Each structure stands twice: as structure tokens, then as C-alpha cells.
Image: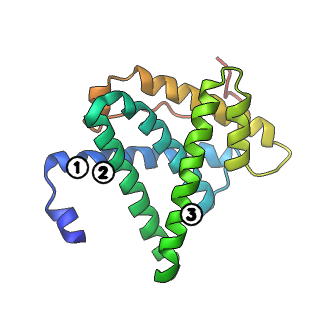
Amino acid sequence: MIWKRIFGRSRKDDTPYALYGALVDQARNPIFYTDMGVPDTAEGRFEMVALHVHLALRRLRAGGEAGKELGQKIFDLMFDDMDQTLREMGVGDLSVGKKIKALASSFYGRMQAYDEGLADLDGGKLEAALRRNVIPDSAAADANAAALAGYVRETDDELSAQPIEEMIAGRVIFTLPRPLATAGAS
């Protein structure tokens, strides 16, 4: 089955892989982990991938049926990736399904919280959701959550400004996140 996915794909089938790869690359930017307080752990990396996938799915909703279809493929790829990662980390076969189900449930909850946070123009709900889900307790947690919320809002705006046809074709452009000292400053 895996060989069919790799060798039996057409060019069109590469689009979700290209887009998911771009999302993962952005989520792995070291600034999130060194300057914004995201833990450089399996959980922290999952949170950042989930956050970027959420932002992409938000944008793809505007792409009609093609956007919804691509969004579903991105979602499926993310959880296939998580399944593979858990197995590589040594999680037993019998536990993987339960863990994936729990990750999917938490992902849906985060999507709702982040959507509500992005709709809340004063920013408090988004910061609270990021503080709860991504940023661990520390002396700098509030500043880190504010910086990450600023990045999320900026990225959501940038994705909304990109032509949906480009994203459906697997092309997305991200601005690099700014270190905490300059995050939110214009």
C-alpha cells in the first residue's frame, strides 16, 4: 500500500504532499522554539504542525470543493505522519490507534479554539488558547503567547491574501516568524 502511495501517484497527487511539507517546514522554524517558548518536544512540534495545518485548512475552506478535498488530504497526511512518528518513537501497535484518535480529538478542539480566537479582535481568546495548548508555564509565558498570537494573526492574514488557486496548486508563501524582541513591532 505504501509503495502505491509513493510510486503510483500522479503529479496531481503530489500537491497535498508539497503543501503539507511546506506547512511542516514552517512549523519547524527554530524561532518558535528558541524565541517564542514553544517546547522543542514531540508535543511542541505536534502543536506547531497542528497550528499551521489549521491555518491552511482555514484558507482552503474558501476554495470550494477543490479546497475542501485538498484540506481533507492534508488532514489525512498529518495523521498518517503522526501515526508513523508514534511508531518510530516506539509506541506499540495496539496503542497507536488510541493515541491517534486522541490527537484527532484534540486537533478538532484546537481548530475551534483558534477559529474563535481569530474572530476575537481584541486578541485575548487567541492568546489564551495558545497559552493553554502550546506555551508551557514560565515567567515569559504571557509574552510568548502574545508573540505567537501576533504571528498567527499575521500568517492568517497573509494566507487570506494569497490567491486560493496557488494554494490549491500546492504553493504557499510564509513570512518568517520574527524573534520575540521584534514580534508584534511594525
Q: Residue at x 22, y 63 (%)?
A: 5
- Nearest the eye: 126 or 178: 126
Under circle 2, the secondary element is helix
Q: Residue at x 29, y 47 (%)?
A: 16
Residue 156 got which mark? none
Kind of residue at badge 3: Ala
Under circle 1, the secondary element is helix
Q: Position of residue 153 (x, y in %)?
A: 58, 27
Can residue 90 be seen from the camera position used here? no
Q: Is 9 placed left or right of 80 in the picture? A: left
At label 3, counting other C-alpha atoms closer than 10 Å, the crowd grade (few under 14, some 14-19, many 20 or more) is few
Look at the numbered discs 2 and 1 and tell me whether their residues touch, using CB distance below 8 Å: yes
Residue under label 2, please give it: 17
Q: Which badge, 2 or 3, is on the more N-terminal residue?
A: 2
Can residue 165 be seen from the camera position used here? yes
Q: Is residue 186 above or below residue 13?
A: above
Q: CA distance from mark 2 to mark 1?
A: 5 Å
Q: Is 54 placed left or right of 179 in the picture? A: left
Under circle 3, the secondary element is helix
Q: Is residue 77 above or below residue 85?
A: above
Q: Is 137 placed left or right of 111 in the picture? A: right
Residue under label 3, please give it: 102
Q: CA distance from mark 2 to mark 3?
A: 24 Å
Residue under label 1, please give it: 14
